[in-house]
Amino acid sequence: MSFVYKLYQSLLSNTEHIAITDGNVQISYQQLLQKSLAIAQAIQANEYKGGCIAIVVEDGITHISAILGIVFSGNYYLSVTKDNQHFLADQSGLHIKAIITDDAGVIAGLEQIPHLQTAQIFNTTKAPLEILAANYTNEMPFCAFSTSGSTGSPKIVIHAAENIDNDTMRQIVSNNITAADRIDLVFSFSFSASLACIFPALLAGATICMFNIKKEGIHQLKQFWQKQYISFSTLSVSSFRTLFALHHSFTDVPHIRFISIGAEPVTDEDVQLFTHQFLPGTILQISYATTETRTITEVKITNGQNAGNFLTSAGKVVQGKAIVILDKQGNACAANTVGEIAVHSAYIARAYAGNAAATAQAFSINGKQITYHTGDMGYINNEGYLFITGRKYFTSKINGIQINLQFIEKTIQQITHATQVAAIIQTGITGVKQIKIYFQSPHQPDIEKLKEQLRNLLPESHLPHSFTRIDHLPVTHTGKLDRKSLEKLVLGNATTPNAMEQLGSVEQTIVDVFNQVLGIQHTSLNSNYFTDLGGDSLNCFVCIHQLEKQLNTQIPNHAIFTCPTPLLLAKYLSYNLFQNSITHQYINQYIPGRKTICFIDLQNAGTYQHCFQNKALASYNLLVIGINIFAIADFNNARAATQIMEQCLSVLSTQNGLILVGYSFWGYMAFQLSAKLPNAQLLVMIDTPHYFNYALYTNNTKTQTIKNILTTAISQKSWQLPWQAIQMHRQKKRAINSQKINGANYSNGINYLVQYGHQLNTNTPILFIKSLEHIGHKQHGSNWQPHSSKKLIQKTIYCNHQQLMQPKNAAQIVDLIVQQLQ
């Protein structure tokens, strides 16, 4: 029986069982089958057969329905996130027949490819589709995935159904997966690791429980496990380590029986943490896999039992695969001899689609047997355990993505003409890895200009986090770069904060936590957590957690985004600013008399400050006003709404030549403030339609509260929400002195705030910068034109709503603002 027909039979056999949960939404196997067949029939109606159908769908349940619908229709799928959907334009080797999307419009730049809208498919009644076993074979293509592109050019791998069948059935049997299991899915559908979650669950009749780490935050994963009674989890090694940094025990998650980790080498410390923090009997599986082969080796460690001497190995080869270690001449190596790892199997990919040169280098075929040269270096010991020692082309992995350090070095050297460049990967206490550049050069290059050039030349995964110029890079006796000596030199001579800086107790604690979490020793009071220290959102949660413990206080999740330097964050925490209705801070030196750029609740103000300084606009006072959503949530009377507005006005009324920047949820606040400030020079609305009017309009009621809007949107994913609003809503119970929200008071307060200024127009020119899919693009009345008596300039940034805060897009937005100010 073919793999596709097995899937169909499983959906038929488990009709009443829950197939997928996504937030507060769940779907049975019967409902999943109905959705899948509707999509399959829509594809067949267009006479697509044996081709690639791309999926650009945000909703998880609909995405899995599309995957099944595509394979039921006799085609194969390629999952693409909305962040990188334009990547489809370059995939001529796949001959994409159509795109399934949950948007009403057509993706810009892909107009030539037919689009199938899911809403239209589900709203059209059709006769039942008959699935016949004879229509499917295991030799048919099943799915396509993109490799990481470690040399700057991602390649496409197509897997036949038999490859996924072999890997899936082995997992079900080996890991004892049954219908009673609840299996989490934390990976993006565009990652081949998602295969190990989706299909074992569907074939066994288990439940897939979806968790979006990017939106929810990894700090919420343990709570998700508890709430959803997760029994089986699959994680990257980095996520696994970050969990241990955030939580010190998982004995209160009794349903977890199996954790599978991979994508990066595992250390003895990782295994020791597992054995100390999980209940006895819990199984840890360490896997070695590639996009081209799926699982190659694995080893299982049962907590409480003797793990043996091979804790940090990649395990033994799995059924259906064989490995051989090759020397430079392509001959098999003896045991314990390092060479390139090659995989032999009939159940791996055969080629890179549309890339004959790369295929010839990596694959060789002998009948049904295929050999894939992984490029990984390692050895097999006498007991048959595989140990991975590095990469043939000197690459390493970060979050499962191969990083070619020599490619980075060569690119930087060509730009800067430095004498020598070294790229190394350093790891913080959470296990999160960062690319650090050390270079030897007679002159100091413009680092910000260099970063901008690298964004155009390197994949995003290869962009360095920091650059350091040193007098001499260590070399070997042959004159080549001595990387081991460099790493020791970096650790031994790491600089401490400037000796002239006077650190208070709070500042010192923040500096110590930043250094510890990021694995550095050179944080100063004015070091920006993101742009200077290379921090990211994953480590940010760990820092917040550590600071809460050491300072014995509760801190909002967005604190570091709002105040990215130790100096600003110390002020923010020392004066309990997050307990006030509004906060205002200058993020540069305030000079009376000069014009002010004010960011209204802009969580990533540090990124924009950086961009403004690059554009020679440091002559402006840069002010951040933060609105505390918890203060609004605790309204006791409607008057409190106007008090917040008046507090903002009192801060801004003294400013000269204001440029107001309104972002996301409080864009409405920026608009109301501009209407009451005659000295405002420009109002910049970033991806922000008229929030309150829009939110109330979509629910057809004037009493709908923001609380309910957020809750509905989170559960149904009906429209993309600002990250910080979701985080603040989710963490409302952690607010200092917070009380249970009174719905009536909350509604009265918000409605009063709307009434306070909804009749107002502004005389300030409006610059409306929207993403391709901004939050109100489908709704009538989301245009700012009726609200300005002066000119309205509309500009589009080619990204989605959540990408607007990325540094590259922030730079484009600042450029647009600068153009209007000149």
Image (cartoon, rainbow, N blue to C red):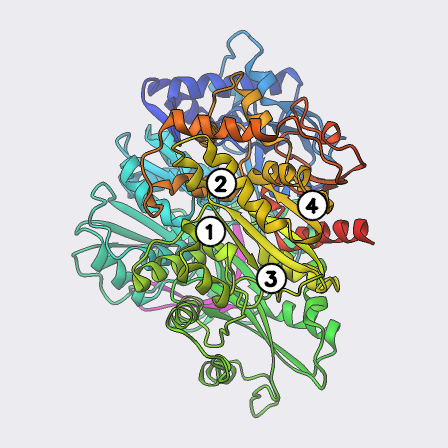
- Mark seen at residue 332: none
Query: Where's the N terminus, which quadrant?
Result: top left
- For the residue marked with disc 1, what is the amino acid? His
Crowding at dot 4, Cα within 10 Å, few <14 / some 14-19 / many 20+, comes out as some
Tell me if residue 318 comes above or below residue 173 in the rendering: below
Kindly identify which residue carries mark 4. 354
- For the residue marked with disc 3, what is the amino acid? His
Give me the C-alpha separation between circle 3 and circle 1: 26 Å
Kindly identify which residue carries mark 3. 462
Q: Earlier in the sequence, mark 3 or mark 2?
A: 3
Q: Position of residue 50 (x, y in %)?
A: 62, 28
Q: Position of residue 787 (x, y in %)?
A: 72, 30
Crowding at dot 2, Cα within 10 Å, few <14 / some 14-19 / many 20+, comes out as some
Give the magenta range: 370-392
Residue 553 is left or right of residue 63, and the answer is left
- For the residue marked with disc 2, what is the amino acid? Ala
Q: Residue 445 magenta-drawn? A: no
Q: Which of the two discs, 3 and 1, sits closer to the camera?
A: 1
Q: Earlier in the sequence, mark 1 or mark 2?
A: 1
Kindly identify which residue carries mark 1. 558
Kindly identify which residue carries mark 2. 725
Q: Earlier in the sequence, mark 3 or mark 1?
A: 3
Q: Earlier in the sequence, mark 2 or mark 4?
A: 4
Q: Position of residue 310 (x, y in %)?
A: 29, 65
Residue 311 is left or right of residue 593, and the answer is left
Pointer 1 with pointer 2, Cβ within 8 A: no
Q: Residue 374 magenta-drawn? A: yes
- Secondary structure of residue under mark 2: helix
